[in-house]
Amino acid sequence: MTDTILTRRILLQGALGALTAFAVSGPAAAQSPRTNFEQWVAAFRPRALARGISEKTYARVMTGLKPDTSVYALDRAQPEFTEALWQYINRRCSDHRVITGKKRATEHEALLARVERDYGVDRYLMLGLWGMESSFGDVVDNPKYMRPVIPALAALAWGEPRRRRYWEQEMLNALVIIERGWAEPSEMIGSWAGAMGHTQWMPEVWLNVGIDFNKDGRISPFQPDDALAGTAAYIAKRGRYQSGETWGCEVRLPGSFNLALADKKAKRSYAKWQQLGVARADGKPFARPGDEMRLWLPERGGPAFLIGQNYYAIRSYNPSDAYTLALLHLGDLIRGDPDFQQQFPGGERRMTLTEMQEIQQRLTALGFDTKGTDGRVGPDTMQAVRAFQQKVGLSPADGYPGLKVLARLRQG
């Protein structure tokens, strides 16, 4: 399961102007108890018609529609699990995901090569993003994680007062998509917030970023061609991706290094960093010594990185350093590059697929059902792990299925 679809969507709209809607709207008045959903549908109709939605389309979509009011709790929910950075990266760069990514790289070699040629974005970065966003399409229409988008957006536009203008705008965007014939309402399946497809587009992103890459006459995030091409075009243009450059690399710092220089601000060429004693962690030479890079130490005592413009190009898709580093590391692992040379403080190495399956098998046999033993780690496995940790007194009971949990399970 992708772990970003419920938390990162605001970013893309921000890049396309929707954050302006947030700023303009401010806190909205609570929905009047006298305004039931049917009344709201009738009152919303003129706005839809003014946006170019036909009477026929509006009636077809909105007549008899039942709002998915379960989204209100999801909108306000706090994260169930908190993760250290190393846990976040390990889980999203799981062995299962790396193996699947290598298969997708072969299966979609022609598509990835064409996207790389047309937009300049490295195919392995796109594979990392694809894996992060939808597990390479595995959860695109999985009812365990996804739901019909129209009832969800309608509920948010009608009854969510904090960001009503934003949700109303996305509801209108979804209606425009239907009006254009790009999708039927029943085909629009996504997260509770409305993110859809292989690279998880909100309706506004669909309208503004989408590319009909397979030339079938419509744009669809549910087709890998359109989704990957549109997302690559976004990263190239909005993120100012520099074709031919790497995103950066893990580096080793000399013992006497001034850590104040690892401020993620000052740019120096690889060559100048090397003069300061910085070297690639894997011992290889810097391939392009003239590229300008910033030095970043996410956690003292952990791995250090030189990061360049392409790091920030990928970060433009989600303004989270944890997300960006995990995505880039996943792409590198799919490429065949090694794990980080330096562990994060308190961290563990990534679990192998066989080890993860063993954890799931042992937990399920003990009555902590993981709802599957394929080595994929989602909420069910994490809930089972936490219940086991609590029962046997493993602290912290954080739900992370790692080496300590496996060792305790093997004790019997």
Image (cartoon, rainbow, N blue to C red):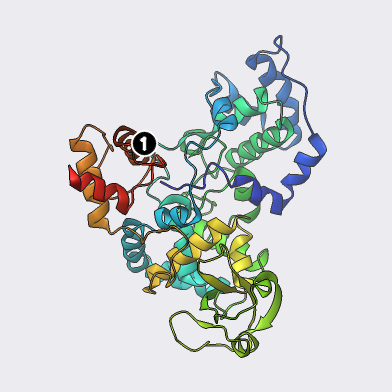
Q: Name the image quarter holding the C terminus.
A: top left
From the top left corner, tell me how far across and down residue 145 is, in percent.
42, 38
Identity, as a three-letter code, of the amino acid under mark 1: Gln
Q: Nearer the viewer, residue 286 or 409?
A: 409
From the top left corner, tell me how far across and down residue 340 is, in percent.
43, 70
Residue 56 in sight: no
Residue 404 in sight: yes
From the top left corner, tell me how far across and down residue 336 is, in percent.
36, 73
Q: Is residue 163 left or right of residue 229?
A: right
From the top left corner, tell me how far across and down residue 77 is, in percent.
55, 31
Which residue is the extreme one toward the top? Answer: 34
**Which quadrant would residue 391 be assigned to in this image?**
top left
The residue at 64%/73% (across/down) is 259
Q: Is residue 324 left or right of residue 350?
A: right
Residue wearing tag 1: 383
Which residue is the extreme one toward the right? Answer: 24
Residue neighbourhood size for the residue with mark 1, other residues' Cα within 10 Å, grouped as few (<14), some (14–19), many (≥20): many
The residue at 71%/33% (across/down) is 163
Where disc 1 sits, the SS reads helix
Q: Is residue 174 left or right of residue 30?
A: left
Q: Nearer the viewer, residue 352 or 37?
A: 352
The residue at 60%/42% (across/down) is 177
